[in-house]
Image (tube, rainbow, N blue to C red):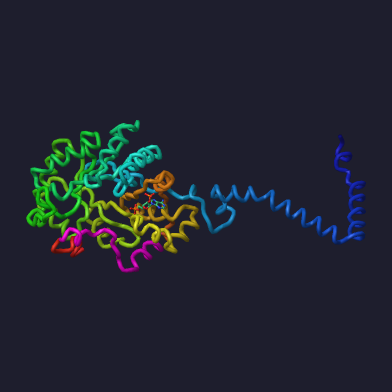
Amino acid sequence: MSFSQKYHPLPTVDKDAGEQESLQRRDPRKRRSLLVIVVIIIMFTSLPFVHMIRSRGLWGACHGSQRNSSTLAKLPSHYTLPSGDNIPSVALGVWQAGKGEVGNAVKTALTAGYRHIDGAWIYRNEEEVGQALKASSVPREELWLTSKLWNTFHAPEDIETALDQSLSMLGTDYLDLYLIHWPVAFKTGTTILDEDLTADPYPTWQKLEELVDKGKIRNIGISNFNIRRIQNLTANNLKYQPAVNQVELNFWNPQPELLKWSKENGLLLEAYSPLGSDKQVGKSLSVPEVKSIASQLGITPAQVIISWSVQRGTIVLPKSVTPSRIAENLEVFELPQEDFERLEKAATSHTPQRVVNPSAGWKLPFDVFDGQ
Ligand code: A2P
């Protein structure tokens, strides 16, 4: 077919033009209906494409203000501890993960790519966690397991037995990290305050150091210690400095002074209840700044908060037993500096509000966080 044969326009144009002209002349309402039909067809056929563009996060590229999470930089996946060990920056928290659900949560997390499980003897679920670890094909050396020494075992002679219980329930012969759960000691087997070991935790710490040397623990740390209590411990001639301090850190209780002090003193913080725990998670995810950053970046509100936590330089321990949330919470992204600062400002501009403070429940004659 020659060019002129293929593209010769004259006869058809003449015909169509004539037809359109006569259509116009004949019936303008028919022409309008035709137009409406054409517009409807275009709308319906383009809808799936619009949906695809939005769902793949490409909308930002076409639309200016929103971005696509795949264009965001990733945050550090690990921090290096004084021992030289690399601890994963995001863990599955299993506090309040009940019996019958915690095992599946751990299995889901390992499949999703988590390698750090943050537990404790007092959560009363270490056995189920251990069974889930055993059922998984992840080699022990790829896992980071944290447990915590409960208040009633602070007496040096009780510590190894408590540790051995956790090791046996978890099905392992060493822990990557073992923390003094609270700066509060109870007398053995009771809930009565042991004033001496509370005032001076050094004997407890020395025993933990011994267990590091014995190979049963790779790193030791503290939890729920304020600056005054940390200094009370570190004023001693420690063989091993605390590797981390695990504390409540979230939008409602961001603790900027503790964070600043810890950075200046080389102490890594771990953020528990990063979403505000089950009590405040709904409120956290509805914070206007969190919502607007999430929609601009094309990520979820939970991912904004978890990312902010890592970007603040802390380890983060979101708890979930819901498979989709477990996967969601592992994906952290570097927030653009202005968004990070906006969130930091919002978090630190209201009166701090803790979710967790057992002082009254334990009938302590002081507030465990006093002086922070
Ligand atoms: P669930 O375990 O039923 O999935 P925190 O980590 O601050 O302790 O918060 C834990 C609470 O937040 C739990 O109630 C948990 O519910 C919920 N949660 C965890 N991840 C998400 C998420 N990505 N979106 C919404 N809720 C979440």
Q: Is residue 234 visible?
A: no
Q: Residue at x 34, y 49 (%)?
A: 319
Residue 141 position within the rendered picture, expressed as x and y whole percent measured from the top left: 28, 34
Q: What secondary structure do most residues of the magenta stretch adopt? A: loop
Nearer to us in this view, 241 or 35: 35
- Does 310 sit left or right of 63 as displayed? left
In the image, taking residue 128 as reference, residue 324 lies left or right, namely: right
Residue at the location (36% across, 54% down)? Answer: 311
**The magenta segment:** 340-363
Total marks shown come to 0
Residue depicted at x 32% and y 36%: 132
Is 352 inside the magenta-drawn segment? yes
Q: Quadrant of the C terminus?
A: bottom left
Q: Position of residue 162 (x, y in %)?
A: 15, 42
Viewer-proximal residue, 223 or 74? 223
Q: Is residue 319 left or right of residue 195?
A: right
Residue 50 lies, with reference to residue 289, above or below; the image says: above
Q: Quadrant of residue 347?
A: bottom left
| Residue shown at the point (92%, 46%) measured from the top left | 11
**Which quadrant: the N terminus?**
top right
Q: Is residue 294 above or below residue 148?
A: below
Q: Is residue 124 left or right of residue 232?
A: right
Judge whether residue 323 is colored magenta: no
Whether residue 322 is visible, yes or no, is: yes
Query: 54 above or below 176?
Result: below
> Where's residue 317, x and y in %?
32, 49
Q: Quarter of the image holding residue 280? A: bottom left
Residue farthest along the front direction in this orientation: 100
